[in-house]
Image (tube, rainbow, N blue to C red):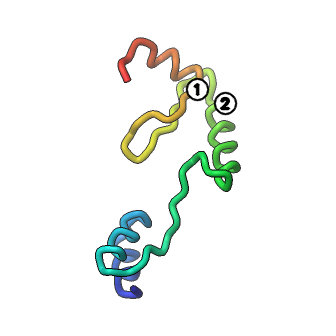
Amino acid sequence: RAMVLRLAAVLNVPQREQNRLLVAAGLAPVYTERPLDAPEMAAVRAGVQTVLAAYDPFPCVVVDRGWWILQANSGAAVLLDGVAP
């Protein structure tokens, strides 16, 4: 476990990928992963909403790791109007 984590740290491997390396090595994952809508993520959601509001009327979007738009402010809505999802 220590060797996998040390190599991953030296190589700047993201935590999600470190978990995958651990599982591939037959070990339990170390890092927890929570969806944004989980109750314990309320402070993060509030922070995201604050940033979106602060940028208005300029476009601001929240994307996931696959670059899918999760949230956007009204400035982004105007910019993206008519663009297919």
On screen, residue 83 versus residue 61, left or right, reads left
Q: Residues within 10 Å of mark 1 (few under 14, many from 20)?
A: many
Image location (x, y in percent) of residue 25: 30, 80
Q: Residue at x 29, y 74 (%)?
A: 24
Give residue 73's mark: 1
Relative to 43, residue 79 above or below: above
Check disc 1 and report its element: helix, strand or loop: loop
Q: Residue at x 54, y 32 (%)?
A: 71
Q: Residue at x 38, y 17 (%)?
A: 83
Residue furthest out toward the bottom = 2
Residue under label 2, please give it: 53
Looking at the picture, which amino acid does disc 2 mark?
Ala
In the rendered view of the protein, which quadrant contains the N terminus? bottom left
Relative to 74, residue 66 above or below: below
On screen, residue 38 versus residue 29, left or right, reads right
Q: Quadrant of residue 34?
A: bottom right
Image location (x, y in percent) of residue 45: 64, 44
Q: Residue at x 60, y 46 (%)?
A: 37
Q: Quadrant of residue 20?
A: bottom left
Check disc 2 and report its element: helix, strand or loop: helix
Residue furthest out toward the top = 82
Looking at the picture, which amino acid does disc 1 mark?
Asn
